[in-house]
Image: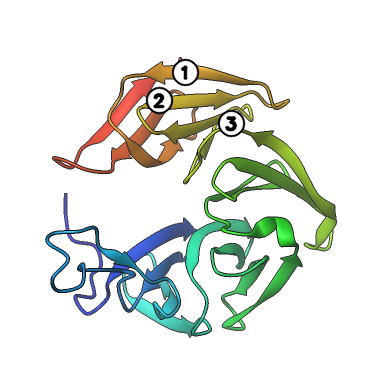
Amino acid sequence: VENFFSVPSLAAFLGVATNKNEIVLGVFQRPFRRPAPAGSQGGAPTIDMSNVGSQILVLDKAGKLKATIEGQDSQFFNGIARAGDGWYLITDSNGTALLRLDTAKKKIEPWLKDDLLTRANGIKVHDGWVYVGSSGDKLYRVQIDSKGKPKGGLMLFEQGVRTDDFAIAPDGTIYIPSGTKIMKVSPTGEVSQFLDNVPNGASAWVTKDGKWLYWATRAGPSQLLRVALK
């Protein structure tokens, strides 16, 4: 393990995507979890997502910062995925739109607006389709046309599984860490349980060869876990 890139002044990194010659990070300048108010006797921290200072950082392959692209004050970048050469899609948990990032133009603009995108979170692009988690327990998808625009509107792909981030295998199977379970969604949308009684995770990743599923634990001793898929 080595330190590839760090900015101590930032509060969090909340998404990463790669292209041939660049690495794109979604970051917060300010935290959204704050200590409980004085006198609350150890109560839960307060959650304020209204002004975290979302930014996009663009690095080269050596980890050198190439560009910083500012989000709007009210935006809460919560997932990012490469959609094509030089452009990416971002979820904004405070808005109702998927955002398009053009790293060459250093520009972020709406790509698809829909009220179904309330609390949008994890996002992946697979085989010409964009998959996005929204409202906590729904997974939608929309196709990308030949010009890089949405083809039609959002379609419900799966619901009922508590979803933060998720992974898509090369064959189109989706794996979702959900509490102490890993749920599995077939390429046609059928839901089943894949693992039970596992450490709680928020995100997952499947290797390009489809042989391994990895996920990082949420709490307790930090762990990166994996299970064989083949």
Residue 194's tag is 1
Q: Who comes first in sequence, dot 1 or dot 3?
A: 3
| Residue at position x 53%, y 84% in the image | 72
| Residue at position x 55%, y 69% in the image | 94
| Residue at position x 72%, y 45% in the image | 141
Q: Who comes first in sequence, dot 1 or dot 2?
A: 2
Residue 160 is drawn in which quadrant?
top right
Q: Quick check: 160 above or below 114?
A: above
**Residue 179 pos. (x, y %):** 38, 33
Q: Quick check: 147 above or below 28?
A: above
Circles 1 and 3 in contact, beta carbons < 8 Å: no
Q: Quick check: 180 above or below 86?
A: above
| Residue in front for this viewpoint, 42 or 50 | 42
Q: Is residue 20 visible?
A: no
Give the residue pinned by disc 3. 170
Crowding around mark 1 (Cα neighbors within 10 Å: few <14, some 14 to 19, many 20+) is few
- Seen as rendered, the residue at the extreme right is 152
Query: How far is the residue under mark 1 from the one under mark 3?
Result: 17 Å
Crowding around mark 2 (Cα neighbors within 10 Å: few <14, some 14 to 19, many 20+) is some
Tell me: 158 left or right of 51: right
Give the residue type that dot 1 points to. Phe
Query: How far is the residue under mark 1 from the one under mark 2?
Result: 7 Å
Give the residue type that dot 2 points to. Lys
Give the residue pinned by disc 2. 181
**Residue 51 pos. (x, y %):** 42, 80
Residue 196 is drawn in which quadrant?
top left
| Residue at position x 48%, y 58% in the image | 18
- Seen as rendered, the residue at the extreme top is 230
